[in-house]
Every structure is written in C-alpha cells, then in structure tokens.
Image (cartoon, rainbow, N blue to C red):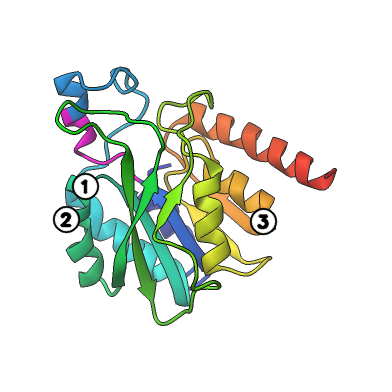
Amino acid sequence: MDAVEWLRSLPSESVDLAITDVPYESLEKHRARGTTTRLRASWFEIFHNARFEELFREVHRVLRNNTHFYFQCDAETMFVAKPIAESVGFKFWKPLVWDKVSIGMGYHYRSRCEFILFFEKGKRNLNDWGVADIITAKRVFNAGYPTAKPPEVAEVLISQSTEPGEFVIDPFMGSGSVGVACARVDRLFAGNDLSTSAVELARTRIAAAEHRVAFA
C-alpha cells in the first residue's frame, strides 16, 4: 500500500516506535547523474518531499505518547524533513550517523554515511545513555534489494527506544531489515511497502530470522 494510506489504517496511539527509510526525492539526482548503478532500475517509487507533512502527521498520530521516531535519510533530505516533522509536533534531538564502513555514491567526497534523524513524541529516556551517536555497521550487498540496510543499525535503535514485547512499525520496510531486527530482540513488528516484491522478500527474511531465534 501507499505508506500514508497504510498508516491511516492503524489506530491512533497504538505504536511504540517508528523507524523508516523513505525513498527520498534526492535519489533521483543520483540516478540522473549516474553516480550509482544500484538505483538505475526502478526498484521503488520516489516519495516526494511535498508529502512529508502528511506522512509525519500520520506517524505522530499512531505513536503513543512518550515514544521515539527515527527517520533515515541523506544530508540533503534532512534539512527538508526536520522542520516539517517539528511542525506536526515532534521534538528533534539530533542526527545520528550510520557509518557504512565502505564508501558508496557520489563524485565529490563519496558517501560513507547516512543520517538518522532522532525525534521524540512526549518524553522517553533512552535505555542506555552510553551509546554513541555513530552506529557502525557494514553495508549490505546481498540482501536481494538495492537499498537494504543491515539489521544491526535498527537493532541499536530498537534496543534504545523500546522494551521487549513492544510494537515497532516501518511504513517503507523495503527488504524488511527493521522486522529482522525486531525478531532478533523480541519486539512485535508490522511493516508495509508499495512494492509487492519487496513485501515478499521482507516476509522471507523476517520468517528466517524468527526461525533462527526460535531454535537458538
């Protein structure tokens, strides 16, 4: 489903944490300039910046009070997203950095990191105040999806912002890395994606993670 429509199907204040990685508008620039081969095929539909307000309003609505929201994006998109999320009621804390270990897209200072904007609804303490704002996890190349994230990144965020058994969502779940992380750390998960192939891949990966946890 469309991510906003999917969020509208969820009850208000029913979610303990939202984490997502939107196919942001600036990806089109990378495709047009040919700075990456992974994005030349139409693996996903771009979610335009003009829709951020309706997206953030729905995320804010479905989150319970005293919860967190993590929004993964690039350096260009973060400057667009931050003020819009604040305008719908989120408190912005800071950008976290995902260090991919190896370089990726671009010509001018090639990208080795992405940003994760850390927002809060109400007031909730992190579970461990000693965790750094740089999360190091090697890029994923073999997940069957071009923009797959290592589950280790989401594991840090989930472990910091929820307790076992709480409910995490990802309205743009892609290959399901957030769901895989939830399976590993005993959280409930629901996800959505506009791509049928992405949904099937996510189901397979999450089921495999659940199987490994069950028999660990």
Question: Do the CB atoms of the residues marked 2 and 3 lie less than 8 Å apart?
Answer: no
Task: Determine whether, in the image, residue 167 is placed left or right of residue 76.
Answer: right
First along the sequence among labels 1 and 3: 1
Q: Residue at x 46, y 60 (%)?
A: 18
Task: Determine whether, in the image, residue 162 is placed left or right of residue 21.
Answer: right
Q: CA distance from mark 2 to mark 1?
A: 7 Å
Image location (x, y in percent) of residue 181 = 60, 49
Q: Residue at x 51, y 35 (%)?
A: 175
All told, the count of numbered labels is 3
Q: Amino acid at mark 2?
A: Phe
Image location (x, y in percent) of residue 60 = 37, 68
- The region drawn magenta spans 22-29
Q: CA distance from mark 2 to mark 3?
A: 32 Å
- Relative to 72, residue 168 above or below: below
The residue under label 2 is 79
Question: Do the CB atoms of the residues marked 2 and 1 lie less than 8 Å apart?
Answer: yes
Give the quarter of the figure containing the C terminus. top right
- Relative to 188, residue 122 above or below: below
* Disc assigned to residue 185: 3
Residue placed most toward the observer, 189 or 154: 154
Q: Amino acid at mark 1?
A: Ala
